[in-house]
Amino acid sequence: MLVSRADLEAFLTEIEESTPDPRAGLYGPASLSWRINRESALFVGAGRATLLQLAHPAVAYAIDQHSDTRNDPLGRFQRTFTNIFDMVFGDLDHALTSSRRLHAIHTRIVGKIGEARGTLGNAGETYQANEPDALFWVHATLVDSALIAYETILEPLSSETKDAYYLESRRFARLFGIPDAAIPESYDAFCDYMNGMFERLDVTPPAREIASFLLSPETLRPQALAPWFRTLTAGMMPEKLREPFGLRFDAREAGRYARAVQIIKRLYGVMPKRARYLPAYNDAMRRLAGKKGRDPVGRAFDALLQSALKGGK
């Protein structure tokens, strides 16, 4: 079964009809999705989400065979998060446009799994990016890693808050055409799903190769922060997946992880909110206030990020 264009359009019609304010888009300022996802601290979980995605054989081989990640990691990073932020913080037109664009791209991503030994795909099997279970796994890694990063850097969340946040995320999953049958009904069921997936994942050769490239000092910028990002990623990963990805997390690394978290928490706690919130969120708030153009702080943030990613040492 694949998510067809007709399947997707049915979900998009449902979203259009249930959106009270198209200017606010999928969620709006009163939502937990905006409250949690606006925090730039969530990027500390980006490495975890990426590696978990790669641990799914179909995803790893799709990236290996169809992505320009090795040649243009910055470009892929920007394109991925531009689409995500358009969906979460954009107005309804931008969210639906990104949804249709990603579906069209995924339609062309078809290939064969190479070496694999898990229950998620075996050597020689065909993968297709618009397959619901693979789509949901990518979605799940973002939701799960966002909550872990938020609680690590900001504050613990109640079980009721996490359940409400997860239920809101099901609306985001609709933008990929993921059917209800592929989506756990509650946050508790989602946690059971994640734990079950951790037992089924298979770190294949392309997954290890791409992960090693993405976490290398030559790829990460600024280079001086690369070891810390690698440590943060290792600390947030499920223990059983560290070794297959070549991530060391001994007592020394655990100490460095704890120090890094404390430093980030202290620095983050004194940052002005406009500086710590994502530019996409600040732009969305300007839009809802009737202001034109991008937030100046967001433009400055983007310029600094571009400089750091392109060559900061």
Image (cartoon, rainbow, N blue to C red):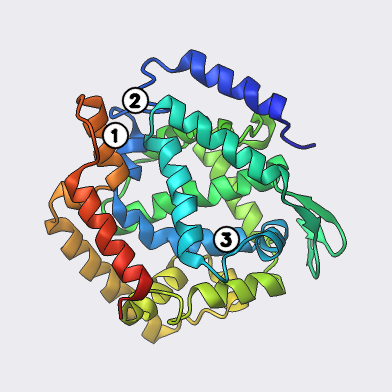
Residue 263 x, y percent position in the rendering: 21, 70
Helix or strand or loop: what does disc 1 sit on?
helix
Helix or strand or loop: what does disc 2 sit on?
loop
- Residue shown at 51% from the left, 72% from the top: 214
Judging depth in this view, the residue of 76 and 230 nearest the camera is 76
Quadrant position of the C terminus in the picture: bottom left
Marks 3 and 1 close (CB-CB < 8 Å) = no
Marks 2 and 3 close (CB-CB < 8 Å) = no
Tell whether 102 sits left or right of 62: left
Residue 190 x, y percent position in the rendering: 56, 42
Task: Return the residue at label 2.
Answer: 24
Judging depth in this view, the residue of 93 and 40 nearest the camera is 93
The Cα atoms of the two marked residues, 3 and 1, are separated by 30 Å
- Residue shown at 12% from the left, 58% from the top: 270
**Amino acid type of disc 2?**
Ala
Of the numbered discs 2 and 1, the one sitting upstream in the chain is: 2
Q: Tell how many labels.
A: 3
Task: Return the residue at label 1.
Answer: 284
Tell whether 288 sits left or right of 9: left
Helix or strand or loop: what does disc 3 sit on?
helix
Tell whether 138 sits left or right of 80: right
The Cα atoms of the two marked residues, 2 and 1, are separated by 8 Å
Judging depth in this view, the residue of 147 and 56 nearest the camera is 56
Task: Return the residue at label 3.
Answer: 52
